Image (cartoon, rainbow, N blue to C red):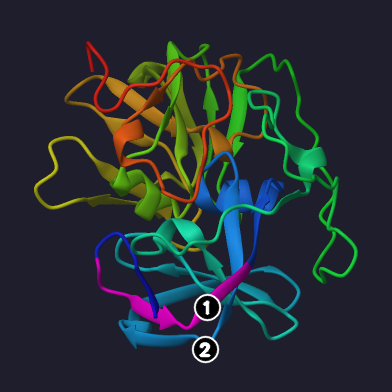
Amino acid sequence: MITGSCLCGGATWQCEALAVAHDCHCSRCRKTHGAPFVSWAFAEGFAWRDGEDRIARHESAPGFFRAFCSTCGSSLPAVDPEGRTIVPLGVVDGDPGTPNQLHVHAASVPPWRAITDDAPRFDELPPGMEGPQIPAAAIDPETAEGARGSCLCGAVRWRLTAVPTLARYCHCSRCRKARAAACTANCFLPVAALRFTAGEDRSRDYPVPGARFFHHTFCTTCGGGTPRVDRARGIAVVPLGSMDDDPGTRPTEHIFVGSKAPWYEITDDLPQHDGRPPGL
């Protein structure tokens, strides 16, 4: 039996098997999770164990309701328009033994990322995989007022008025649960360089009990990733997956690789740190 849970542990589920694991690079998945891509698999024998009453849902495409925990914001398994339960592998507990088999919506890979493995890739959905064909989102390489970002539903919007000072991939278990993805990609900049243009009050901050710095920030309507403002340290942490424009920076390293998802392999040549890198 395969089990899973959200970041706060309030919503839990189980299934008998997972099949056809694939990485989706579409803009809707990136915005929902605030991640560089999302790994999905189709579930057999799925059932909720606890916390179904705390699940919120947002209709991101006709008949497709994305699910997330209303307490911590983790994306959760959902039912697609064909009636299949799809599971984001990031919220699986342990190793489901389901390595990535293909890339879908590869035409939507953002400019700050590249696919570097040998798995088959499809610009949209491959033949036989039913679902909405999502056109590649236009990325504006330069904006006079700063790079734009937004949650999935567009209720929360922001601009970066300076190029971020740093960007990195994080593979810690908290990021994996929060984003329901193999890893997250965040950029960092001074608080003064982040300007909300709409919906700042729609963004919820969930502090993980016992964590020194870790918070998960998300839109309460759609569950999409939103920036976290850490005024104590004077920084804003922005999920790159939620950016509409090119932020002008690229991830330079992988951190907490010692906690990496067992079903995901890093295939680029960026530096890797087993835990917290020097200076963090």
Q: The C terminus lies in which quarter of the figure? A: top left
Query: What amino acid is labelled 2 in the image?
Result: Gly
Is residue 252 shown in magenta? no
Residue 261 image position (x, y, % from top left): 41, 47
Question: Is 160 located above or below residue 223 in the figure?
Answer: above
Which residue is located at x 44 percent, y 31 percent?
A: 238
| Residue 231 visible here | yes
Residue 26 image position (x, y, % from top left): 71, 48
Which residue is located at x 63 percent, y 17 percent?
A: 145
Which residue is located at x 14 percent, y 43 percent?
A: 211
Select label 2 or label 1 by which is in front.
1
Which residue is located at x 67 percent, y 29 percent?
A: 116
Is residue 12 shown in magenta? yes
Magenta range is 9-19
The chief SS type of the magenta part is: strand
Number of callouts in the render?
A: 2
Task: Give the residue pinned by disc 1.
Answer: 17
What secondary structure is marked by label 1? strand
Which residue extends farthest left? 210
Horizontal relation, residue 181 to residue 37: left or right: left
Horizontal relation, residue 164 to residue 65: left or right: left
Residue 89 image position (x, y, % from top left): 49, 60
Task: Give the residue pinned by disc 2.
Answer: 45
What secondary structure is marked by label 2? loop
Indicate the quadrant where residue 175 lies: top left
Q: Nearer the viewer, residue 48 or 247?
A: 48
Question: Is 174 located above or below residue 21 in the figure?
Answer: above
Q: Residues within 10 Å of mark 2 (few under 14, many from 20)?
A: few
